[in-house]
Every structure is written in structure tokens, then in C-alpha cells.
Image (cartoon, coloured by chain):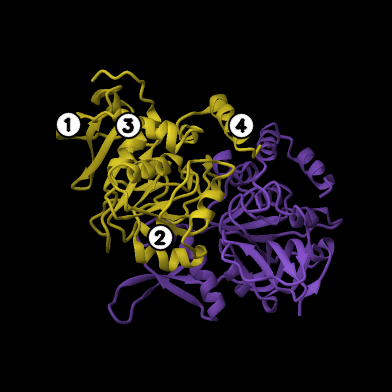
Chain colours: A purple, B yellow
Amino acid sequence: MTHWIDLKSSADCIQDGMTIAIGGMTLYRRPVAWTQALLRRASRPRDLTLLAFTAGYECDLLVGAGVIRTIRSCYFGLEAFGLAPMFTHKAAHGELRILEETETSLVLGLRAAISGVPFMPSQAWIGTDLPRLRPDVQTVTDPYTGQTLTAFPAIPVDVAVIHALAADSAGNVLINTNLGIDPELVYAADRVIVTVERVVEKLEKSVDGLLIPGAGVDMIAIAPNGAAPTSCYPDYPLRGSILLDYIEACNRGDFEKYLIDFLDEPR
Amino acid sequence: MKTDFDITLDEWICVCISRQVIDGEVLAQGINTPLVMAGFILAKLTHAPRIRFASAIGQSVCDDWGPLGVGRIEEVWLSKGLFHAGFATATAELLPKYNPKEFFRPAQIDAAGNTNNIAFGRDYQRPRMRLPGTGGIPDVTPYSDHIYLYVPRHSPVTFVERVDFISGLGHRADRQRGSGPRYLVSDLGQFDWDQGQMRLISYHPHTTIEQIQRKTGFPLLIASDIHATPAPTPDEIRLLREVIDPLDVRKLETLSGSARKDLLRSILEREHAL
């Protein structure tokens, strides 16, 4: 059953040490309003593991605010805007635990978790330094040919947070076609929180979007403009000036001040 | 050759990328790699009309294209996609099926074509500089035999004796499959690999073999038929400037500092995405 919930309550269910997965792609359809709600909590969670196929602005805010201990992502940056400043700073100072990931390690790790098997075999990483940086990732021998393969371990996800275009009264949810790994996050996560731009009576099938059945959605919170300054196609494009201002504030050493202003912003 | 227009560094790179494209193949459009996007579209508009794009934005296969952008680039790929696979299916199924040609941009590269996009500095816990990450480079380089590379600003910071981390696998005798990179273009010249060693095959006319060697942190092989890179045609330059990339997005990869910042702001303004 889907619970209709306010944004604040949806953020209250995050507990210390959880793995939270952030939906969307780099600067597209990220749950920024939800990030704000999480960081507005009087008692912020600690030692979270952040899973994001690609991590951007909202993930950098979480890292800067100090709630993240471990990063699992294959790209952490702001595309044409540049490096993600707080991730870059903290990683260079040894303040983050980075589990070096790639597209394949994340995808097969999630697929293993979804399928209920301990690992998925792959040709990826063989010969590179990745196995040295990830000593927890083992190899297996193909019983048929004797070939060495990488055994990507299942990635458990406690909570996935996805921003969507709309929900309907039955709890079905519509996302646009920049899917990222959102469908897999719905399958893999123990709990799925979706924030939506709006609620409609009944969602129709669309070639420009993907319907996620309400059966896979645990909580829905309404958050108009909830992805800004990242985009929410076709509703709004990214807001470049906000991203530029963020980078400049961090480069001046003003992250804390930026965060206070960000948390004060009405949405 | 005397031309009546100044060819800029980004345009040398785009044109060289375009000329590596074979008609009919599938090409991977990465995220934030506008020199590659411009070069691929140039190929489609000149000698390779039947190429297709596998786009990271929207995780789709597209026959069509649109002009380059920053704030509105998502719209191009979402509106042109024949279907949208999502990144899990794209990684695990689409890429193995179509085996698209892709140009990666290494932060460091050695003579054997091993590349690094993890961090500068060998201390993984406290690197000199952490980089955004490797995407799918460690996944495909162990088995692919058509890895292509580009470097927008050729310098000894990028071309190094030894990479700090190997995230892209180069030419190695002990590899199980694949071949290491086939080709590299920088703002100075074009390169391939001869028996596992990087080799200069052409220099852009604004530089010399000696200058390229000075800006490379290891000894380069020089091809026996070394020559100046054939100049872009007026039509290629016109297509790049007027049709493919009127906003000059491709120049974001070759500019730095305040010039780059000003260009980015102006692009976003013209896109109404500031």
C-alpha cells in the first residue's frame, strides 16, 4: 500500500547507517526538495552510504553537510559546470570512504540484489587497478571455460528516493524517459520514496514516460518544483545560475553559508 | 595550406573525430563530451549518413540529432530517442549488442594507452586531486578492440610516464581479450599504437613534431609517413559553426578559467536555462 506522506515525514524515516539511493541522472530529475527536507531535520542522520549511478548537485550537498560516510557512484560531478566541489574536497582529505564503482559494478550489483543471488559475473575490470582498489570484490573461475571473471557482489539498498512528474490516486507514478537506473532502484530498495510534481486522478500510458506501478512505491510526497535546480523534463530545464552560484560559494569556502540559505529556501 | 578562416583547436579535434567514423556504425554519445558529439554529427552530415547514436542521456538509440547544448541538451536526446532503455539495460545489454564506438577523455595516459580517470596522486585515500570517476571505462576496455580517445589540451600532465591508477586497460601482452586503444586525437596531433607503443601519425599545422614530443611525458614513436593533418574543408567548418554547434558548446572543452566561465554563462543565457 502506498502511503501519502508529507516531505518532512518521508525524510524522517532515514536512520543512521542506512544506504540511500538517489534517483535521476547527473543534473536531471534529482530529488532536490527531498534532500532539503532531509537536511532540515533537527537531528540529521549520520554515516549514510550514498548510492547514485551518477551523483550531482544534491549528492554534493549531502556530502558537504557531513551526513555521508560512504560513496558508491561511477561519476560524481556537475557535467559542463565542473567538479562537484564538496566531494572533490572531502575525497582529497580522506574524509570519505569511496567504494570505487563503475557502470557495470553498480548495475550487476543491483541486479544481483534484485535476483537474490550473491553476485553477478562479468568481464569488466580484469587487468585494471579496480580490483586492487576494491579488495572486497573477488573473482570467480568460469566452470565451463576456466576463464577468470569478476564477481560483482549484490548491493543492498535500504531506501530509494526518486523524483517523478506525477502520481495518480492509485499511487502509480510517471517518470520521464531519462530513466537512469530508477526502475532497478524500485526493484532493489527495501523502501521506495517518490516525490512528485503533481497528483492527477488517473495516469495514462505514455510513450514519453514510464509508469511505475503503485505496487512498488511505498511513500509518495508532493514536491512541486522538487528537482530544481536540476531539470524535470518536460516541465522545466536545469537552472544554470544556481549551479554556478553553488560552485562559486564552495570555492570561496562558503559552503556552510550556502547550505543555511538553501535550507531556508521555500519551494 | 592557406585558408581564409582561422581553424580553432576544437575544430581540428572535431574534424579528426568525424574522419574516424565509418558509415553505418553505432556511436556512443557520452555525457559532457561536446567535441565528440560535434565530430559524430559532422560525420553524419558529410560521409556517414547512416550512423546511429547510443546516447547516455536518455539511454537511447537515435537516428536523429540536434544542435549541441548544455541546459537543453537533455531535450535533444529525449525527443530523438527511438526507445529508452534505462542505464541498467544500456550497460548490460545495449552496449554488448551494439558495441558502439566511443571516444573517452583520459585524465592521464601512458605510452601503452593505459588511462586514469580516478585521481591524481598514488595515495588512493588522500589523492592530490580526486576526479569524478570512471563511468564504464574499466568495464569495456578489458575486452573492447575499438577504444578511441581524445585529449582537448595536450600536456605532460595528461601524457605521463606512468598513470597513477589504471582505470582504462591499454596494450598489454597479458590481456585476455580486446586490444587497447586504436586511436587518439589531441589539439596537437593524431596518434595510433604500433606494437603497443603510442605513435604520432600526424601533427596539426599549428605545431611541430618537436613541440608535441616536448609536451608528452614519454618518448613517442614517429610514423614513417608522418605528415601534417589534412586541413578541415570550408564546408566542415561551416557545418560545425552554423549548423551543428552555433552556441560554441564544443569550445567548453578547450577553454579554461574565466573565458570558459563566460562562455558557459552565455550558452545558458541563450538557451534560457540560466
- Cα separation, mark 4 vs mark 3, equals 29 Å
Q: Which residue, given by chain and number where applicable, does mark 2 sit on?
A: B139
Same-chain check, marks 4 and 3? yes
Query: SS at mark 1?
Result: strand
Q: Chain of mark 3?
A: B
Q: Chain of mark 1?
A: B
Query: SS at mark 4?
Result: helix
Q: Is residue A15 visible?
A: no
Q: Give the amino acid type for the residue marked by disc 1 in the picture.
A: Ile
- Cα separation, mark 3 vs mark 1, equals 26 Å
Label 2–label 3 contact, CB within 8 A: no
- The residue at the point 76 percent across, 61 percent down is A198
Same-chain check, marks 4 and 1? yes
Q: Which mark is residue B265?
A: 4
Q: Chain of mark 2?
A: B
Q: Which mark is residue B226?
A: 1
Q: Which mark is residue B235?
A: 3
Which numbered disc flags the more N-terminal residue, 3 or 1? 1
Query: SS at mark 2?
Result: helix
Label 2–label 4 contact, CB within 8 A: no
Residue A140 x, y percent position in the rendering: 39, 74
Q: Quadrant of residue B274?
A: top right
- The residue at the point 66 percent across, 56 percent down is A69
